[in-house]
């Protein structure tokens, strides 16, 4: 009997919520095994809460440790029939497995967490959204896009029922990504536009950058490169402005792929290497493999096929080790292209077949198109017309779902050409037979009447053949005229595209220069504001010391000027008016970062003035000691304020306080 079945059988569902970060944990470090081994270590629900807290804290820095804590929490929760605790602990375990790139075990564990949540008498809607979306995301990562859409649809339905706009946009975006991977580009664009409208209403620049990038990716797959570069550039501009370095690799890679499609190989290699440098810093295995695939394609464009195969096979091995089949299928097709260019027909045929079989199993129509096309062209060159036609039909059927109008015309042309060649061969054989028969009759027959009959027959046959040949010439002449017109039209389209691309590049360069100058100006103002704040803190310290000295001041023999002493203390107090200084600082700060405080208040109205001060100093990249001096508190108190502020902002475990504030 499975763990879920045992818990269902008990029928005991508790509604006790646990706190992931108990107050008594305090400011312990992430590695806190000592807390669990102390003689007075917490037990029962408190122990489960501590285990979950430790598992959450270790997710990004030590996922193996996180997995260990989560497993113990799952065992204790199951033993006590605490379903809510069990659901959340299973979710943390699945997160740890995902961090370890174990997608299949992570998927199974997310499904367990979903099942546990459904066992509750009143399942938590927000948690149900996350549970369904987590499973869909894992299926998407493994290339099961039809399956992922099913789970994203269920998460979307719950989000709409509770009016959660953020989760509505997130799940719509995930659905659109899966549609794009299935080759349903029109549907994907439509859904992404819905997401874009929602994110524009919310005014979230980070999400807008992601939306622009996703739309660009669809246009890129659709071979609409002008639109693709337009949207990729918008995404890159936002992420550069926000300093989202972890997203820049994807933006650089996408732009590189467009340059590669335009045959601007040096630019493509430059952008791929920029992306690969960032991915290696972050040890992102999937992204590293993706960049290696891009470099392999770049070397293919340079006709350096041996280096191309080296990069592509390295990418293939990484994708296979991570069980990312849909990316493996695409890389296999590229390796087949490289071997075909090297005239290694056997290797090319092997890799094309591997790619086609994997793509058909996953229903990846774009990759089916590419792999089948490679086999069709390979067999055509070998003059194996039967196999060539077989794979051409697979290629065109798959392409019909993506480019129906173009595919219909091309497959008709192929069939007409094939049938025409077949008829011409038959006609040549027929003509030879007629000639042989005629000669035989002329030799054997001396009868004039028979000769006349044969001559008339030959005349009719000749007229029929002449008519057939004249119709054929007329058809070929019309085809040539149509071909010439299409060629001329294509040249005009290419010229228009080149002009538009040059204009886009010029606009992109100008916008980059403007953004660079704006960024330098903001950085200079931030530096000036930081310097002023530090000088103000220094002045306050000096005045504080003077006040203390004045307070100790006594005149000999009890004589002196107490009114002077009091006036001095009042003047010092007036000069150290912290409240007024903060108001002045806030005015200057808001002149640089206009919507910073309003954005914080809008999403977190419970923030105090102290919280706002801390957020402003973090925005200026001040050190802990500098912040302590400005706030007139100890450095340890600054860390405590940071911890409390993080709880108020309800930040996820993988996001730091500094990155959140810099993203505002």
Image: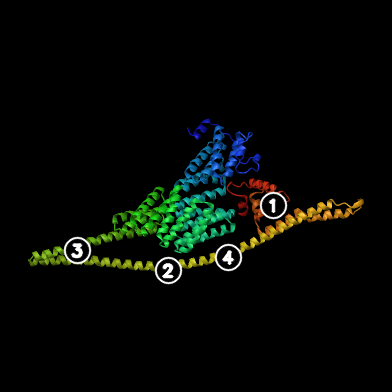
The picture places residue 474, in percent across and down from the top left corner, at: 28, 67
Chain-order first, disc 4 or disc 2: 2
Q: From the viewer's perspective, is the residue at label 3 or at label 4 nearer?
A: 4
Identify the residue position indicated by label 2 in the image: 492
Residue at coordinates 56% horizontally, 55% vertically from top-left?
A: 245
Q: Look at the numbered discs 2 and 3 and tell me whether their residues touch, using CB distance below 8 Å.
A: no
What is the CA distance from the residue labelled 4 to the residue labelled 2? Answer: 32 Å
Callout 2 crowding tier (Cα within 10 Å): few <14, some 14–19, many ≥20: few
Q: Is residue 18 visible?
A: no
- Helix, strand or loop at disc 3? helix
- The residues tagged by marks 2 and 1 sit, at their Cα atoms, a distance apart of 65 Å
- Where does the image place residue 23, in percent across and percent down from the top left? 65, 40
The numbered mark, 3 or 4, whose residue comes first in the sequence reads 3
Q: Which residue is mark 3?
A: 431
Q: Secondary structure at mark 4?
A: helix
Looking at this view, is 236 or 298 the one in front? 298
Q: Position of residue 231 (x, y in %)?
A: 51, 59
Q: Is residue 419 left or right of residue 312?
A: left
Say the numbered circle drawn on residue 248.
Answer: none
Residue drawn at (56%, 60%) of the image: 237
Q: Which residue is mark 1?
A: 625
Decide which of 308, 326 is in the foreground and name it: 308
Say which label, 4 or 1, has the lower sequence index. 4
């Amino acid at each position: 009997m499975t763990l879920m079945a045992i818990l269902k059988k008990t029928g005991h569902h508790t509604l006790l919520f646990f706190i992931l970060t108990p107050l008594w944990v305090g400011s312990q470090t992430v590695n806190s095994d000592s807390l669990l081994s102390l003689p007075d270590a917490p037990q029962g629900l408190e122990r489960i809460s501590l285990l979950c807290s430790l598992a959450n804290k270790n997710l990004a820095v030590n996922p193996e440790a996180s997995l260990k804590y989560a497993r113990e929490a799952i065992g204790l929760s199951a033993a006590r029939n605490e379903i809510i605790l069990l659901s959340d602990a299973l979710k943390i375990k699945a997160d740890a497995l995902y961090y370890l790139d174990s997608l299949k075990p992570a998927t199974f564990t997310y499904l367990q967490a979903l099942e546990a949540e459904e066992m509750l008498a009143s399942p938590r809607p927000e948690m149900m959204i996350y549970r369904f979306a987590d499973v869909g995301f894992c299926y998407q990562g493994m290339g099961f896009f039809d399956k992922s859409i099913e789970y994203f649809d269920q998460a979307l339905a719950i989000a709409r029922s509770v009016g959660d706009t953020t989760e509505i946009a997130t799940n719509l975006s995930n659905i659109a990504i899966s549609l794009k991977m299935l080759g349903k580009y029109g549907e994907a664009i439509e859904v992404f536009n819905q997401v874009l409208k929602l994110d524009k209403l919310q005014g979230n620049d980070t999400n807008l950058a992601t939306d622009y990038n996703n739309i660009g990716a669809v246009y890129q797959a659709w071979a609409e490169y002008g639109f693709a570069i337009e949207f990729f550039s918008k995404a890159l501009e936002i992420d550069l402005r926000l300093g989202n370095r972890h997203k820049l690799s994807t933006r650089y890679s996408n732009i590189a792929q467009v340059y590669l499609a335009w045959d601007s190989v040096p630019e493509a290699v430059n952008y791929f290497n920029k992306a690969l440098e960032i991915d290696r810093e972050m040890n992102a295995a999937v992204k590293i493999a993706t960049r290696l695939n891009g470099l392999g394609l770049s070397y293919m464009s340079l006709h350096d096929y041996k280096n191309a195969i080296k990069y592509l096979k390295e990418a293939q091995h990484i994708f296979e080790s991570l069980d990312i089949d849909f990316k493996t299928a695409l890389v296999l097709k590229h390796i087949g292209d490289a071997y075909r260019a090297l005239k290694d027909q056997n290797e090319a045929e092997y890799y094309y077949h591997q790619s086609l079989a994997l793509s058909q199993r996953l229903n990846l129509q774009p990759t089916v198109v590419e792999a089948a096309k490679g086999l069709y062209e390979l067999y055509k060159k070998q003059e194996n017309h039967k196999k060539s036609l077989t794979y051409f039909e697979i290629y065109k059927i798959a392409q019909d779902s993506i480019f129906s109008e173009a595919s219909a015309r091309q497959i008709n042309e192929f069939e007409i050409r094939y049938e025409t060649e077949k008829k011409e061969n038959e006609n040549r054989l027929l003509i030879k037979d007629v000639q042989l028969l005629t000669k035989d009759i002329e030799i054997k027959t001396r009868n004039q009447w028979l000769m006349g009959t044969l001559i008339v027959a030959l005349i009719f046959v000749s007229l029929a053949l002449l008519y057939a040949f004249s119709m054929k010439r007329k058809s070929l002449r019309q085809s040539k005229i149509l071909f010439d017109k299409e060629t001329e039209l294509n040249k005009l389209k290419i010229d228009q595209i080149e002009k538009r691309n040059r204009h886009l590049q010029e606009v992109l360069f100008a916008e980059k220069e403007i953004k660079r100058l704006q960024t330098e100006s903001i950085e200079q103002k931030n530096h000036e504001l930081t310097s002023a704040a530090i000088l103000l803190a220094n002045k306050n310290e000096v005045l504080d010391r003077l006040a203390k000295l004045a307070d100790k001041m006594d005149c000999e023999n009890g004589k002196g000027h107490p009114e002077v002493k009091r006036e001095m203390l009042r003047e010092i107090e007036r000069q150290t008016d912290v409240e007024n200084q903060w108001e002045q600082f806030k005015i200057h700060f808001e002149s640089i970062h206009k919507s910073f405080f309003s954005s914080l208040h809008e999403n977190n109205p419970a923030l105090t003035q102290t919280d706002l001060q801390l957020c402003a100093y973090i925005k200026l990249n001040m050190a802990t000691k500098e912040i302590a001096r400005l706030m007139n508190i100890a450095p340890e108190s600054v860390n405590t304020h940071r911890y409390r502020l993080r709880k108020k902002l309800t930040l996820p475990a993988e996001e730091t306080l500094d990155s959140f504030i810099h993203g505002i």
